[in-house]
Amino acid sequence: MFVQRTKVLQISLLAIFSAFVVELIFGLVSNSLALITDSIHALLDGVVTLVLLLAARMAIKPPDAEHTYGHGKIESLGGLIGGIAIFLIACFFIYESINRIQSPPPTILPGMFAIIGGLYTIGIDIFRIVLLRRSIQKIGGTTLKADFYHAFMDLGSTLVAIIGIVLVSYGLYHGDFVAALILGGLLAVLSVKLVYKTALDLTDIISPELVKNVRDIATSTQGVIGADSILMRRSGDTTFADVTISLRGDTSFDKAHKISSNVEKNIKNKIPNASITIHFEPNWEDVPLDAKILDIAKSVEGVKGVHNVSTHKTKGKTFSNLHVMVDRERNLSSAHKISEIIEQKIQDNITEIEHATIHLEPFVTVPENLNLEDKETEREIKMILEKYPEIKKIGRIVSLNFENILKIDIDCSFDKELSIEKVHDLTSKIEHVIRAEIKNAVITIHPEPN
């Protein structure tokens, strides 16, 4: 965008400079004071266009240590300078128009040669106006708007000069005054609007409606509970948004990141050239007690895993049960201290819990790459399983060796009408028997219906 603007401003600068040269030469040759004055205005207009071009070029620079949001604000600053210059020139027009009506008629009248010079400048101004207007509609930018107003002003001043030349030739001196006065007033209004808008851009003003749209987009994204804080600003073409969303407290980090990415994508789909930063925070309202307890227990140092979390009420009091895994090498005293910390944190954070019962279990880390299967152990396990008539079919037995630990996975089929509670009790019993026979075994039994 910024590169395109600099190219447009370069073309505009070359065009207005050619108008200055033509008007000055034709004005001197034809002794037209109006044309010479308008050439000076064209030169000033070229200087302002040069300032806008430099501002647009500086805005292209990428972010650095001192400008982490980039240099887009420089373009707004260039627009502000351009707007002030337009206002001052407009005031000069008004002053000159009032001053001319009080001056005696000129003794030397310009001829057709001066009008031809003015017509060339009119052609240049029309070219600039069309070029800049199309560029504004396509790529926008305050520097282009400022130069567009300058081109419009230059067209008006040239028309005033030509009208003045014609009217003065016929003795209608007041026509020059009226035309210049109207032009000066119009340009003053346009310049004030431009200065006001660019000044607001420099103060980081942002539309409340735009903030509301961002909030609505964020909250309508699946998984988002609310959007608590939204900070926005503009720098050049880029809209920066810093959005804080709240998610359920039991949301996993991976899921939270995915939701954040969806929020960012949805905002960018609605707001072009947006740079979005998403922060997420946990919200524990309406989160089940089991999920809160799980999160608290997992946060305690030394805890390797938590499962089978449950809560129940008895006589108006709430109790909790959970299984906590700790390093298998810890002694009972050290492991019990971890359970005490968990219980205390649960009661501190969830006051409605009367008591938490914690079942400690050894945790064994299973590596991804295991050694070869142990066929002898598998035969031994099969002999144990055959002692249980409830097992209708013995499926796959996989025993994998690593260091001094065996990881054993067993598939067993049971009567399909058997309750899951009985199946669980039976598999737990079988696992216990296998552990008694095979030391350092990590056993998982997968029950299946026969």
Image: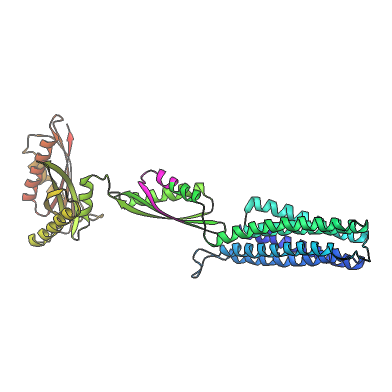
Q: Residue at x 47, y 51 (%)?
A: 211
Q: Is residue 221 left or right of residue 238?
A: left
Of the 4 image quadrants, the one containing the N terminus is: bottom right
Q: Is residue 260 left or right of residue 156?
A: left
Q: Which residues are magenta?
A: 216-231
Residue 386, quarter of picture: top left
Residue at image coords 22%, 57% = 299
Residue 115 position in % (x across, y down)? 89, 58
The verdict on residue 294 being magenta is: no
| Picture residue at 16% right of the left edge, 56% below the top | 342
* Residue 4 visible at all: no
- Depth order, front residue of 444/251: 251
**Place of residue 83 in the rendered image (x, y in percent of width and height, measured from the top left):** 66, 62
Residue 47 occupies quadrant: bottom right
Q: How is the image coloured?
A: rainbow
> Residue 200: x and y, percent?
56, 59
Q: Residue at x 12, y 37 (%)?
A: 421
* Foreground pick, 95 / 263: 95
Furthest-front residue in this view: 102
